[in-house]
Image: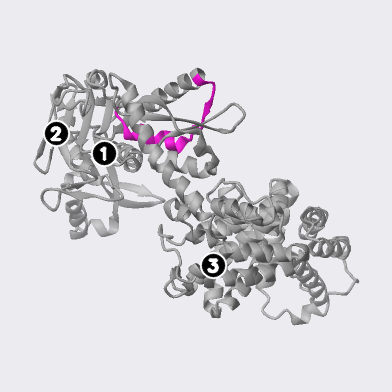
Amino acid sequence: MIKRDILFEIGTEEIPARFITRAIVELDNIARAGLAEMRLKYGNIKVTGTPRRIVLYVSDLADRQEDFEETIKGPPKNQSVDQNGQYTAAALGFAKSRGITASDLRFTEVKGVEYLHAVVREAGRDTMELLPGWLSGLLKKIVFPKNMYWEEQGVRFARPVRWIVALADSAIIPVRFGSVTSGAESRGHRFMGSKSVQIESAHKYAETLEREFVIVDHEMRKKIIMDGIAKIEREIGCIADKDSELLEENAQLVEYPVTFLGAFESEFLDIPEEVLIATMKKNQRYFPVRSRDGRLSAYFIGVSNNKARDMSVVRDGNERVLRARLYDAAFFWKDDMTSTLESRLPQLEKVLYQERLGSIRDKTERVRSVCAWLVKKMKETKITRAVDRAALLSKADLVTGMVFEFPEVQGVMGREYALREGEPEEVAEALFEQYLPRFAGDSIPKGKIGAILGICDRADTIIAIHKAGLPPTGSQDPYGLRRAARGINEIIWGLSLDIDTDALLAYAAKCLNADKDVLAGSMDFCRQRLHNQLRERGYAHGTTSLAVTSMGARPLQVLRMLEAFEDVSGEPWFESLVLSAVRVANILNKIPDKKPFSSKKERTDFSTEAERTLHSALDKQGGSVKRALEAKDWTSVCKALSELGGAISVFFDGVMVMDPDPDVRAARVALLLRCKELFDSIGDFSLLK
């Protein structure tokens, strides 16, 4: 069998870096699914891209589809053949619906009954017949966050498509997209390469473009950048902040990466380093550099898309741009400190939080109230004043010049300005820590003041946005409610804060005059997020559901209960106990009126040793479970259940619950009622089945 290498290059105007990585993953998935659907075998698929091209490379693609044969079940024989032995209308209609003739029909026995079966065969087609349509379809299936239209309405892509290379080895595959038709002509680097580059064959594509200063493989570009950074680090004796997202973005911004070292005046190091880092990373895509002791230095490492004859020209240009940004930051830093945070509070009244929810100042006052309530509930009266002060100043930095210019440093500037105004250190730190964690895996607040402020602010947000009728829908979550709910749980777990989140949300709802439906929806939303968050941590669905339904209002206890039950979930006694708990529930569900049996729960005149053993175990372990539940000692709960499990198993093995004797049956049902009460005090064990 002949095998071919397939090259499909989509040449475009510069595509935004954030689009490219997503498009690579999507095209890889679409290509694999398409080849499988077409029954085409291949060796390997590689999808990569640069700002000016997205490339699919398929190696060792079979030159022909595999033949296809499928047997499809039809009507039974008694409906397929008439009394004369001829096919009925039903049989002939079945054959027609499958595109076959009556000669392709067969009778096959299935579980003692003969059924008509259609044997559908399809001979494989030549790969070259299939590729034009398939590759054209790929162009239309790639989805971008935003598309551009530049010709007829049906032609759209992230950026205008300027050329297409489609080759099977060296043969051109005819593909058309708008007015662009495929060929073997690509393009080199925009500044250093040729405007027209002939690709002799698919397997020579990468090496041909490399000679034209295009490194097609984005992983190779990342390696070149990392090697360049390492070389500079050795030369200056410093260490760069090698942020993985920044590395990915830089790799997708260039076709031929060239690293260079730049510098700025050391006087700018007086500005908080978060501002400097934000300026370098977000605005300029530079890698900040630190000295060996971890302090930020006055260097940066940039990545150019141009290997200039004199790289000092590139360096000087980048230094001028950064210097201008830093002068702006220095101005805001100096100007902001002419006013205190507290003096800025009236300005918050003019900043709209949400049109139905008032201003940021209104939110600040609500958060102060919720904080005061939570501090009292937690009996942390020593920090009452500090929490209130932090809540009062929590959003004041939003109206500073620095945060207006660099929104990502909110909280950071609140802390820095508060420290310079003489606020207590724990209050200043809370102004920053209220935003932690900012994303999954981020650090959490170290102090209780910042933790309480962050929890209360998030609770207010969840209730407020639900009240405004704007909860998350599908992938849309413009107000970050999922992140808010996640943050509350992460803080509670990280600092071991046993907070009743239902009560917290109820008080936040009271401050907002939210109705019971808003509160119920908010509570349900937080329960769902808690369940999802724990599942993401790897906990089993059943035990997670049990813990959340049992202790969902107290995330700390949910986690501790889950940890204890996960530790024993694989043990034989626990699996047997779960089956027993489900069996108990099933038996009792068949008894419509349980009142006559409830009065028998205290009797001790049992007829078998199994009943007496279970009664004794319930007396002993029932009390142990109750005390352990009150103390939220989940390890002791599991220990008591393990000692009870054997007695229940012996009971079910040795007796018949629904005995013909009414008194015997009543005693045994009464024992099961006691078992169910004990199980229900912990949770719904049927969720573990």
Label placed on residue 258:
none
**From what the image shows, is residue 164 above or below residue 444?**
above
Q: Quadrant of the N terminus?
A: top left
Dot 3 lies on which element?
A: helix
- Do callouts 2 and 3 mark residues in contact (Cβ within 8 Å)? no
Position of residue 90 measured from the top left corner of the image (x, y, whole percent): 21, 59
- C-alpha separation, residue under disc 3 versus residue under disc 1: 75 Å
- Could you tell which of marks 2 and 3 lies nearer the N-terminus? 2
Dot 2 lies on which element?
A: helix
Point 64% across, 66% down: residue: 501
Q: Which residue is mark 2?
A: 129
- Magenta residues (range): 236-255
The residue carrying pointer 2 sits among few (fewer than 14), some (14 to 19) or many (20 or more) residues within 10 Å by Cα, namely few
Label placed on residue 69:
1
Point 66% across, 61% down: residue: 452
Q: Nearer the viewer, mark 1 or mark 2?
A: 2
Point 58% across, 33% down: residue: 295
- C-alpha separation, residue under disc 2 versus residue under disc 3: 70 Å
- Do callouts 1 and 2 mark residues in contact (Cβ within 8 Å)? no
Report whether 517 appears left or right of 167: right
Q: Amino acid at mark 3?
A: Leu
Position of residue 587 measured from the top left corner of the image (x, y, whole percent): 68, 68
Q: Which residue is mark 3?
A: 345
Residue 472 within the magenta-colored segment of the rendering: no
Q: Which sits in the foreground, 624 or 53?
A: 53
The residue carrying pointer 3 sits among few (fewer than 14), some (14 to 19) or many (20 or more) residues within 10 Å by Cα, namely many
- Could you tell which of marks 3 and 1 lies nearer the N-terminus? 1
Q: Quadrant of residue 529?
A: bottom right
Q: Amino acid at mark 1?
A: Glu
- C-alpha separation, residue under disc 1 versus residue under disc 2: 20 Å
Q: Which sits in the foreground, 107 or 61?
A: 61
Q: Nearer the viewer, mark 3 or mark 1?
A: 3
